[in-house]
Each structure stands twice: as structure tokens, then as C-alpha cells.
Image (spheres, rainbow, N blue to C red):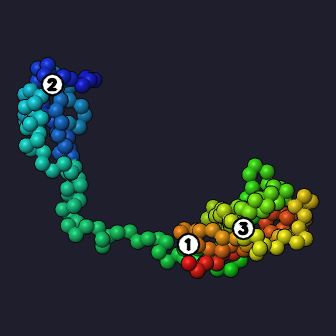
């Protein structure tokens, strides 16, 4: 393999070469051509060969692309693949339709006590498990709308009703969830908030 050369000191002879896609290059005449390339009729100094390429290689698109575009002059509009999800409701619509199974998402320790600390901070992660792969949402709690009476986070008993807000896919939504502290799971739903 040869490295970059100083054009002023390069007195080697080159071939103009072309591949099957009608792309051009130059190659030292004393070296064997790489697979897929053929001599394109011009041999000479580096500058002379590059000048020849500038004259003959006016369409830089590969041959296969030029042929494809010639066969499809109006573009691919009529052949464009249909969106397989075009008739599928958005994630916001799906999670706003009824109650769904949710679980509290905590790291590194998934305990009722750690959940209590998150509630106290005013921000929890809830995972809607019924979507493909699950959907984990960070919910900013609205303290006055949450019901924590009867919940013992230290013992992991009781139930809480959480209410908070977030944006999902650029849509402002409210989230409500009832969580059993023994299992850290329950039911939840979303509702689109007016802007």
C-alpha cells in the first residue's frame, strides 16, 4: 500500500481506473489493479489523470443508483412502504384508555422504604408493563392530590394513590396510580392535560 505523495515530486505513471459502478480513480501503473477495477483508457502523470477524471466523471452517482432513478422517474411515492403503525393508536392514547398494570421502578433497591423516599422527594418512576417491552415514566407528583393515609413505607404495608404530571411524546399528561406497598405494583392510567 502506498501512502500520500508529494504531488510536486511524484513522477510516477498512473492509470485512470473505473469500477463496475462507473466510479473513477487513479492507480500506479506499476502496481497490479485491485479486484473490480479496470483501466479506463488514460495513462499518464498524476495531474494529467486527475484532470481527465474531472472531465469524464460528471455524474458522481453510482451506476446502480442512476439506473434505479431512471426506472423510477417519479420517485418512490407510489412504492413507499406503508407505515405498519399508521392505524395503531399512539402510546399516549393507549395508556389513556382505561387502567393498566404498573409497577414501581426503583434502583438499586426495590423496597417500600426506597419508594417512600422517592414519594417524599416528589418524583417516582412507574413502569407500565403492558406495552411492548414496558414503558417507564418519570412522574412529578402533585402532593395535594396524592393519598398516603394508611401507608406504612417502613413495614411495606398499605396502599397509596399517586397523582402527578409528565410529558409523554411531547404531550402533557396527568398520571394516577394505586400502588400496593407489599408488591410495589398496582394499576395506573394517563389522561391528556389541557394546555
Hey, which residue is sitting farthest front in the picture?
A: 144
| Up/down of 8 relative to 37, above or below | above
Secondary element type, mark 1: strand
Look at 68% across and 65% down and name the residue there. Answer: 139
Q: Which residue is mark 2?
A: 7
Q: Nearer the viewer, residue 86 or 189?
A: 189
Secondary element type, mark 3: strand
Look at 47% across and 71% down and name the residue there. Answer: 84
Look at 9% across and 26% down and name the residue there. Answer: 45
Q: Nearer the viewer, residue 104 or 42?
A: 104
Q: Is residue 109 visible?
A: yes
Give the Cα distance between marks 2 and 3: 68 Å
Question: Which numbered disc, 2 or 1, marks the residue that appears first in the sequence?
Answer: 2
Image spot of residue 106 (x, y percent): 75, 55
Q: Which residue is mark 1?
A: 171
Question: Which numbered disc, 2 or 3, marks the residue that appears first in the sequence?
Answer: 2
Image spot of residue 71 (x, y percent): 20, 64
Q: Nearer the viewer, residue 122 or 25?
A: 122
Rendered image: mark on residue 141: 3
Image spot of residue 58 (x, y percent): 12, 48
Q: Is residue 188 left or right of residue 13?
A: right
Look at 68% across and 73% down and name the residue there. Answer: 175
Amino acid at each position: 500500500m502506498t501512502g500520500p505523495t508529494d504531488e510536486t515530486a511524484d513522477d510516477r505513471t498512473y492509470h485512470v481506473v473505473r469500477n463496475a459502478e462507473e466510479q473513477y480513480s487513479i492507480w500506479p501503473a506499476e502496481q497490479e489493479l485491485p479486484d473490480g477495477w479496470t483501466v479506463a483508457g488514460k495513462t499518464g502523470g498524476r495531474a494529467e489523470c486527475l484532470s481527465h477524471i474531472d472531465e469524464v466523471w460528471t455524474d458522481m452517482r453510482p451506476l446502480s443508483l442512476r439506473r434505479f432513478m431512471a426506472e423510477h422517474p417519479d420517485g418512490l411515492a407510489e412504492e413507499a412502504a406503508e407505515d405498519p403503525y399508521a392505524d395503531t393508536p399512539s402510546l399516549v392514547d393507549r395508556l389513556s384508555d382505561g387502567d393498566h398494570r404498573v409497577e414501581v421502578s426503583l434502583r438499586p433497591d426495590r423496597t417500600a422504604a426506597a419508594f417512600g423516599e422517592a414519594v417524599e422527594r416528589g418524583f417516582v418512576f412507574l413502569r407500565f408493563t403492558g406495552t411492548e417491552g414496558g414503558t417507564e415514566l418519570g412522574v412529578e407528583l402533585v402532593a395535594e392530590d396524592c393519598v398516603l393515609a394508611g401507608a406504612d413505607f417502613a413495614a411495606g404495608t398499605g396502599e397509596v394513590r399517586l397523582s402527578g404530571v409528565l410529558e409523554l411524546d411531547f404531550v402533557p399528561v396527568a398520571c394516577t396510580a394505586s400502588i400496593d406497598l407489599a408488591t410495589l405494583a398496582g394499576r395506573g392510567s394517563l389522561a391528556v392535560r389541557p394546555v
